[in-house]
Amino acid sequence: MARDTAESDGGENGDKRAFGGDCADNNTLLDRRSYLKLAGATTAAATAATGAASASGDDYDVITARGQVIRLGNETWENKLIDVTGGGSITVVVEGAATIRNVGVKGLYQGSSFIFSITNTGGTVSFENVYIGDGANKRGESFVHGPGAIFYHRSANCRVEFDRMNVQGYPNNGFYCSNTAHGGSVHWTNCYGKNNGVTTFRTGSGRDTLENCVAYNDNTDYSTSYGRWGNYSESHGRPLWHWGNQTMTATNCNFAAGSYGAAAITHQNGRIVLDGGNISGGTQGRVNTSRAGSTPDLSIPDGVPTSAEAAASGSSGGSIEPRGDYEDLRHTYEFVAEGESEPTDYYFEIEDGPIEPSTYNGATVEDDVMWVSDDGTRAAGRVVDGRHAWEFDTNIIDATVEGPAHAVVNDVDSNLDRYPLSGASGDGWKGDMPWHDEEEADEPEEDDSDDEDDHEFEHTYEFVAEGEDEPTDYYFEIEDGSPIVPSTYNGATIEDDFMWVSDDGTRAAGRVVDGRHAWEFDTLLVDVTVEGPAEPIVNDQQSYLSRYPLPGATGDDWKGDMPWHTSGEHTYEFVAEGESEPTDYYFEIEDGSSIVPSTYNGATIEDDYMWVSDDGTRAAGRVVDGRHAWEFDTLLVDVTVEGPAEPIVNDQQSYLSRYPLPGATGDDWKGDMPWHGDDLDRTLLLDGVGASGKTKYEFVVSGDVEPTTEHGSSINDDTVIDGGHVTGTINGWRDAFSFSGELESITIDGSARVSLDGERIDPSEYGEELPQILTIVSNGSPAAYEVSVDGRIETIAWDASSRHATVDSDGTASGEIEDGYHRFRYSGSVTDLTFEEGTAFVYAGSDRISPDDY
């Protein structure tokens, strides 16, 4: 039976963009020729190619591929069998938040481009129970790699959910989704793919996820006639390839490389974390396999269709049971508290009802402690030592769990931190449930004759910082009608010097270090702020600070001015605002007081660049383009400032010439600070005096580096320092740098004399020799390229390649070019050249080369 789909525990909608043609990651995989050909086909042609009635004996429509384009908006497109056995092309362009369910592609695909192209710019696109597993070849596609299965477009910006997919034998990627690096996210669950050229799962963002998925290569023969798949064969593609520079996670997945060189690979500076599952065949790049095994289970995940007919008819090769008690409700939400004696109250809300209680996974339906709103969009419950489950069909927009129960959505841990979402109705309805009234009724009536000291308060709030040496300041406020009193609940300590209550008893504050504070009261919390590592606990449960402040809170003005905040008598500031040159400073005070860092006058506390001696009498720091401040009570006895920062004592200029005074311990302790690392005892001078025109330079050192004014050199705004890598320009003057370690490489473009530690050097003698130049020249139209060498290849810092291209450690460079040229330095020989879109003129030295040469 057909069912509407929904977003479950996720959903990231990006900014909307107009659809302007297929120009993707390396701009497009629908090349210009293919795109114009597809644009000439009409939706009417697509309709004409659809079977007039369901296939005999089965509940699905048959669509014969004849070159048509089918465009989907905000709709459900289900129970379709796409027949490609005749060799025709078909493209389904997903322009809206569509649901594609129960679709099978039958036969070896010999058409052009991708079968599905996602261009949607808002909402969620869902694929469920889809089979694209009969393979493809290059008969109808001139692009180097041939056709692909699913493409997430460069212009797309939406959430895509793939569930129970089977994609096999496609030359140009199974799931080409690395364009999420530019917006949106893609999420695979229970998906299966193998023998897809280039890659099966191609990701681009840290938001992308895989769970319970399988990808590998074996010797299955789908038909590789009509040419090779570019550089790939049916058994030669990456199972998982992550682009971009973020970390993505694959949970409980299984990957095997087969004949390919690695099963999981990163591109650029991305990172993959395998959380559970197994992998074999090695990795390339930054892949964390510490939590994965080495014996992958390559069987098809449960529920994945194994034929086009099975998918189109809504099964997975046999009958498929409903997820829970209701055939027409797609999602489940469970609250699992088995073995827990403490009650959990939970609340959640969806976009549109109904919500129904369920016995899914053996859950119990308890009418007395389960509630649904009249409109069916909100539900709540209390579970103790058991399991509650609910079923529904639209997006979750809010969820709150108060207690130890574990929240599970569609058999996956629910990420509660992401709620509430847009459309949630707030927290006002939470808490006033029938079982709460019963709880109050069961409580014995208070004896008014009891002494106030014996009063049992309804609520406790604890701030737990045991083992923490960093102080935590906290502030909270309650409704009128009850006082707040300090408590020894759960072994807490009452520290009068570090605990405060307002005169009306509705506000309290404290500072706790390596200990526990507790408070008791009767009315509801309306505001809580915690500044530090202490854990807030309300009524023995974690306190969710993100829900505060609530209506009735008096604001933040009262927070911060507590007795324990009393400032030191003196302040010392080092003001370097607007200064790009670092200042190192050192000062010392008399015994009897400790120096503490301060935010006085808007100063910044930088732990990595501020130091205090164990006895608290000496302090040091490094400040660049900012302000440091300190407080203390006794008198200064020594100050040293090395750099342009201005020293200010008690809001007045500090006269450094009067130091040191009697009692100072000397200079031996100065200079050996954590931020100094290796001393910057070496000098590199780039001298362009007398040269005409601008000279560009790039160099790399093995240690730290900073600009200096030695030899009268200037410090320029266009100098860029990234670790030990430096680029810049000189125009008739000098730049100088102090550094530690070794000079590893240096390149000069122009005219300049280079000296190292006072000795003239030849830049060509430093670094690995990259003697050859590769040049890619635009022909006036967009192109996306990838080139590989058997040595090393690097961009040139001042060339357009440094902004529009990337290089990998394996000797591969890729980029996009629309005008001008890109240049690279390289060693060895060019081994491969491909264009994923368009073409350009490519020269190795002075020799023109083309993809046909490789």
Image: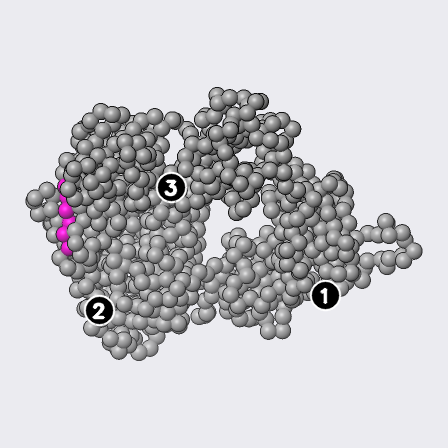
Disc 3 versus disc 2: distance between alpha carbons? Answer: 55 Å
User: Which label's residue is closer to the chain start, 1 or 3?
Assistant: 1
- Could you say where residue 403 lies in the image, as x and y percent from the top left? 65, 52
Residue 728, position in %: x, y?
Answer: 26, 41
Residue linked to disc 2: 38
Label drawn at residue 450:
none
Provide the secondary structure element on which disc 3 rests: loop
Q: Three-letter amino acid code at disc 1?
A: Pro
What is the distance, in whole Å, between disc 1 and disc 3 at their CAs? 64 Å
| Horizontal arrangement in the rendering, residue 528 relative to residue 484 (left or right) | left
Residue in front for this viewpoint, 81 or 163: 163
Quick one: quadrant of the C terminus? top left
User: Which of pointers 1 and 3 indicates the residue nearer the eye?
Assistant: 3
Q: Which residue is mark 1?
A: 434
Tell me what residue is drawn at x 20 percent, y 54 percent.
817
The residue sitting at the left extreme is 847
User: Which residue lies at the image location 54% right of the left edge and 38% below the top edge?
Assistant: 649
Residue in the foreground of this view, choosing between 88 and 780: 780
Q: Amino acid at mark 3?
A: Ser
Which stretch is magenta?
773-778
The one of 311 and 73 positioned closer to us in this rendering: 73
- The residue under label 3 is 580
Q: Can I make out residue 279 in this image?
A: no
Residue at image point 62% right, 31% down: 634
Do the CB atoms of the residues marked 1 and 3 lie less than 8 Å apart?
no
Q: Which quadrant, please, contains the N terminus? A: bottom left
| Callout 1 secondary element | helix
Q: Viewed as shown, does residue 441 lie left or right of 262?
A: right
Q: Mark 2 is on which residue type?
A: Leu
Q: CA distance from mark 2 to mark 1?
A: 60 Å
Which sits earlier in the primary sequence, circle 3 or circle 2? 2
